[in-house]
Image (tube, rainbow, N blue to C red):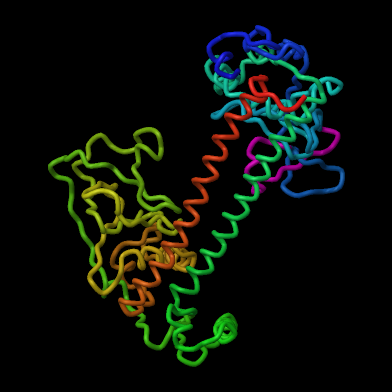
Amino acid sequence: MIEKIVNQEIPKGYKKGKHYVIPENWDDLVISDIVRFSGGAQPPRSEFINEPRKGYIRLIQIRDYKTDDYLTYIPIEKARKFCDETDVMIGRYGPPIFQILRGLEGAYNVALMKAIPDEKRLLKEYLFYYLQNGDLYNLIDRLSRRTSGQTGVDIEALNNFPFPLPSITEQKKILSVINTWEKAIELKEKLIEWKKERHKGLLQKLLWGHIRWNDLGKGLSKGDIEQRTKFISTGVPPKGYQKIKSFIIPDDWEFVEISKIAKQVTRLNKDNKNYVVLSCTKYKGLVDSLKYFGKQVFSSDLSKYKVVSKSEFAYATNHIEEGSIGLQKDYDYGLVSPMYTVFKTNNYINNEFLFALLKTENYRRIFETMMSASVDRRGSLRWNEFSKIKIPLPPNEEQEVIISILLESNKEIEYLEKEIENLKLQRKGLLQLLLTGKLRVNV
């Protein structure tokens, strides 16, 4: 039956709608027949405060759906448009435009509008999913217009988009199927969060030797290991451990300057070779700049850029306190900005071990402290100072085992993230079929 509809045939029990072939017992409407839109209001910024107070209400903005870092409140008497957690909200401006949102309560500003359904005929939750229709998004994106210098939603196109409408009973059944998928994705996301927290714990304990790969082989019980970590958490080195500065590491580990295991490398791209240009990110390390940013943010003249070979490190000299350090693992040769510092290691250390260590919050804080105390006050961490930083150095064999454990843990997370991507793609396809009647639930 789905094949017939795809081929523009009309199977029994279906009819030709304004845009889709739909079930005969569905109403063939456009969105404005069943939904009205209410734009937000923008109070003066002079009224904004950043904490709750009696007589004030939260002002909801698009960014609030992603972070609580910028909470804003306004006097209740200045509020004009309101939403609650069940309301379906649309991001009017972009990029990206047409974000479909819900889950917050307060007054909302002009960057949002509320989609208000005729609730006798259309459930809010059904509307929420229908507005995520891929055909609708593509239309809005294509016809978006400029408003006050921003890309905005074309309201006329939105109002006139087809809305095939099943009965409330069938809407509920469709939502039951969708919610089953949503719960599966939510459970998978919670599992990933748990795995990530576990991975962070492993990083902290393994990279500093607070748990050892051969603990169980030495006859230590789980209780013995827990007792050790409790001691360490109080700042007291247990038997077999030493305290150096603020760090506690095993007695058989060294604590060495980076200069002992690495040296700076400076090779300019004098021949202007067309190597891939890399940028350093907080979480992923070195990435293809063009792919990551979606546009060219580097100079067209690459002759002064630095060459970074495979297995070499690079960090943003002026931004390392953000965690901007990477290990070049993907290309024989790449290029980084002249403002980067490049270095390579010797055989005393495993590159993956050093990379994992330097990406920890411990070292990010060390970088931040050293930059704020720099002599020239220009907020940079040059090699002369960077190379004096000390790191814990286990025997080579233990480095290898630590990294194999961490990489395996990371692979588990990556596998689960791919599973979620696939689930979301399947859900997207299922939504399109269910919300246009190509796939029916038991009715």
Q: Quadrant of residue 253?
A: bottom left
Q: The N terminus is located in which quarter?
A: top right
Residue 177 appears left or right of 19: right
Residue 396 in the image: above or below residue 141: below
Asked if the magenta segment contains residue 76, the reply would be yes
Q: Residue at x 81, y 31 (%)?
A: 82
Q: x%, y% of residue 62? A: 65, 35
Residue 41 colored in magenta in the image: no
Horizontal relation, residue 4 to residue 298: left or right:
right
Residue at image location 62% in from the left, 8% down from the top: 10
In the rendered image, residue 386, in percent from the top left (x then y), is placed at 33, 67
Q: Quadrant of residue 105?
A: top right
Residue 196 percent coordinates (x, y): 54, 59
- The quadrant the C terminus occupies is top right
Q: Which residues are magenta?
A: 60-78
The number of numbered discs placed on residues in the rendered structure image is 0
Residue at 24% over, 52% down: 308
Q: Quadrant of residue 135?
A: top right
